[in-house]
């Protein structure tokens, strides 16, 4: 959720890692994935845009590569400023709300896929998901408080 005040400490788009992801919620559970590079940290499915790629194009490509499905009915949920979990650098993440076109099957660089409430004790979520996306989904009534 981008803050209106862009003070001197806020990173600009050019200095931030840019990511596009989707919050997929089914039956009150959020789809999260982890990468082979860090299988213990869970993120929203998505990734970095290729050159001149629009956010929705990135989302479709990443879902096809990583999950073998397409995002259905994507709608912009929020722009989130956080710190990238692996890289430790400022990150700007465009988050869509979407459903899935089929049954997801993790592929490419993904290690694991889980449906979670966000309250699991054994779950390590990326800061952007934990601090921004989960509270927003709970506020919208999509996940249990």
Image (cartoon, rainbow, N blue to C red):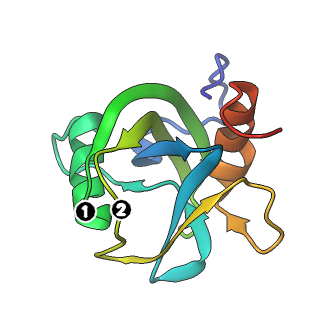
Whether tag 2 and tag 1 are in contact, CB under 8 A, the answer is: yes
Determine the secondary structure under disc 2.
Answer: loop
Compared to residue 19, the image places residue 103 above or below, namely below
Query: Is residue 106 or residue 130 the one in the foreground?
Result: 106
Please name the residue shown 40% across and 25% down the image: 75
Q: Is residue 97 left or right of residue 129?
A: left
Compared to residue 47, the image places residue 122 above or below, namely below
Q: Is residue 71 left or right of residue 135?
A: left
Query: Is residue 89 or residue 102 the one in the foreground?
Result: 102
Determine the secondary structure under disc 1.
Answer: loop
Q: Is residue 12 left or right of residue 108?
A: right
- Distance, label 2 to label 1, CA atoms, is 6 Å
The extreme top residue here reads 4
Q: Which mark is residue 39?
A: none
Please name the residue shown 44% across and 43% down the image: 22
Compared to residue 63, the image places residue 120 above or below, namely below
Q: Position of residue 81 (x, y in %)?
A: 59, 39
Q: Position of residue 139 (x, y in %)?
A: 75, 27
Q: Which of marks 1 and 2 precedes in the sequence? A: 1
Question: Badge 1 is on which residue?
Answer: 68
Q: Which mark is residue 104?
A: 2
Mark 1 residue crowding within 10 angstroms, few (<14) / some (14–19) / many (20+): some
Please name the residue shown 51% across and 27% down the image: 77
Query: Is residue 69 or residue 58 the one in the foreground?
Result: 69
């Amino acid at each position: 959720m981008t803050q209106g005040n862009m003070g001197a400490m806020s990173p600009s788009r050019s200095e931030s890692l840019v990511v596009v992801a989707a919050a997929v919620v089914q039956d009150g559970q959020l789809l999260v994935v982890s990468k082979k590079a860090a299988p213990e940290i869970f993120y929203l499915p998505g990734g970095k845009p290729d050159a001149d790629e629009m956010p929705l194009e990135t989302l479709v490509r990443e879902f096809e590569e990583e999950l073998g499905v397409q995002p259905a009915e994507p709608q912009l949920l929020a722009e989130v400023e956080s710190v990238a979990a692996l890289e430790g650098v400022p990150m700007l993440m465009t988050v869509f709300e979407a459903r899935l076109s089929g049954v997801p099957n993790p592929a490419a660089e993904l290690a694991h896929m889980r449906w979670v409430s966000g309250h699991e004790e054994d779950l390590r979520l990326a800061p952007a998901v934990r601090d921004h996306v989960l509270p927003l989904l709970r506020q919208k009534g999509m996940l249990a408080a």
